[in-house]
């Protein structure tokens, strides 16, 4: 009878404690907002999105405040036991949520110090790739630990949670045999983050397709093809197979234009014309611009125009421009130097119209 009468009192105490925790959270949030507003010149919300942590902190304050005050509350065992379990699960979920948000805040802050849209964005792409992969690996670990801890709060499945954490070696061997491909994919993702054969926004040639690395996950890589298609490639491909990375050390690149002209073509004048063409365009980076005779056949000369650009996109546009204007130059000034097939007929002195017979 006393227990029944004491339940409303216990519940009312718990409600007061929870409301107190909520009020403390609101007060703390108000103080933090004032603090951020005071130092807005040093801490910009766009660069350090601290407000992303408000929601998980608000979720965590009530159970943490209850944990601190429960020893001061006289609760029966039948009430305390399920309450402890609920608070434990509540706290585990809240901490996991908070860790996810903290990872994102740290990543956003670090990336804010780099400019991916800059011309020389090698460092930015390197850091971005590392942070994205590391964030996903840590997220996977947080989820694994959180699920294990939640299972350990239930007596019937307590051993399962303990096994996940304490028997990682044996479980790893069993899972390794059952899912060797998945484990190798995960390890490949971590290896990509450390060694970085590819980075976000790298220009690559994969499966004879030109594109840029758009996304790197733990299992696959998304390559944005030049015609806006998306090529989904298993991440193990970049560990096991050869591919071209045009921006591994620098975005600067050389472009080639091959032309076939007659033997009478004025090579020196074509060199001068090439210099004039590249000087008039902003696509050229002023490093290399020359024409070389790379081959000869019985019909034509093979010329190679070599030009340089800051990146592969500019190099493509520059190659097209050089090819078009060199052809126009030959058409307008030296049309006889365009490739042609010669046929020489010798007059047969014994040939006469008298030898023709009427058919």
Image (spheres, grey):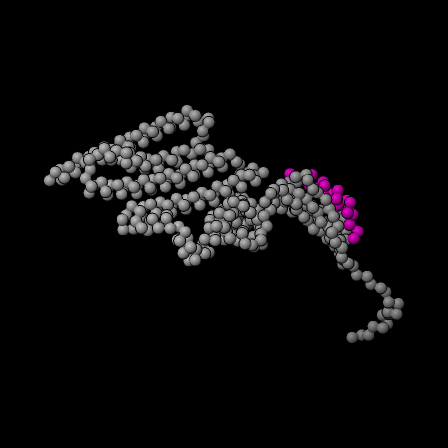
Q: Is residue 79 magenta?
A: no
Q: Is residue 264 magenta?
A: yes
Percent position of residue 224, x then y: 52, 48
Res 321 seen here: no
Location of residue 295 (image quadrant): bottom right
Q: Name the outermost residue toward the left.
A: 1
The overriding secondary structure of the stretch rendered in magenta is helix
Location of residue 153 (image quadrant): top left
Q: Answer with left or right where residue 28 lies relative to residue 45.
A: left
Q: Name the outermost residue toward the right.
A: 349
Q: Answer with left or right where residue 23 lies relative to residue 188.
A: left
Residue drawn at point x = 44 percent, y = 33 percent: 48
Q: Which residues are magenta?
A: 263-282
Residue drawn at point x = 41 percent, y = 46 percent: 140
Res 155 seen here: yes
Q: Answer with left or right where residue 10 lies relative to residue 183.
A: left
Location of residue 315 (image quadrant): top right
Percent position of residue 119, x then y: 58, 38
Residue drawn at point x = 45 percent, y = 42 percent: 135
Nearest the camera: 52 or 302? 52
Quadrant position of the C terminus in the picture? bottom right
Residue drawn at point x = 53 percent, y = 39 percent: 124
Percent position of residue 61, x then y: 31, 34
């Amino acid at each position: 009878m006393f227990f029944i009468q004491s339940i409303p009192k216990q519940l009312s105490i718990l409600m007061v404690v929870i409301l107190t925790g909520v009020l403390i959270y609101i007060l703390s949030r108000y103080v933090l907002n004032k603090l951020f507003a005071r130092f807005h010149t040093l801490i910009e919300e766009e660069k350090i999105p601290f407000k992303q942590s408000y929601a998980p902190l608000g979720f965590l304050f009530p159970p943490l405040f209850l944990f601190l005050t429960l020893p001061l509350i006289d609760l029966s065992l039948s009430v305390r036991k399920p309450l402890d379990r609920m608070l434990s699960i509540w706290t585990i979920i809240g901490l996991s949520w908070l860790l996810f948000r903290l990872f994102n805040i740290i990543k956003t802050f670090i990336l804010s110090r780099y400019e991916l849209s800059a011309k020389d964005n090698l460092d930015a792409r390197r850091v971005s790739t590392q942070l994205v992969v590391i964030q996903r690996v840590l997220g996977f670990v947080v989820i694994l630990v959180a699920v294990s801890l939640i299972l350990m709060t239930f007596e019937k499945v307590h051993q399962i949670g303990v096994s996940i954490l304490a028997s990682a070696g044996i479980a790893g061997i069993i899972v390794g045999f059952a899912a060797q491909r998945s484990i190798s994919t995960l390890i490949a993702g971590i290896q990509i983050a450390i060694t970085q054969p590819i980075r976000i926004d790298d220009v690559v040639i994969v499966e004879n397709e030109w594109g840029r690395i758009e996304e790197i996950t733990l299992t696959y890589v998304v390559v944005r093809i030049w015609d806006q298609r998306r090529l989904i490639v298993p991440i193990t491909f970049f560990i096991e197979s050869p591919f071209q990375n045009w921006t591994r050390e620098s975005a600067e690149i050389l472009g080639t234009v091959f032309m076939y002209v007659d033997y009478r073509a004025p090579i020196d004048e074509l060199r001068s014309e090439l210099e004039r063409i590249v000087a008039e365009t902003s696509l050229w980076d002023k490093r290399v611009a020359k024409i070389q005779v790379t081959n000869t056949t019985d019909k034509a000369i093979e010329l190679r125009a070599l030009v340089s650009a800051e990146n592969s996109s500019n190099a493509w546009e520059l190659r097209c421009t050089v090819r078009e204007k060199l052809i126009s130059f030959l058409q307008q000034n030296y049309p006889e130097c365009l490739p042609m097939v010669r046929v020489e007929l010798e007059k047969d002195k014994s040939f006469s119209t008298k030898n023709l017979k009427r058919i």
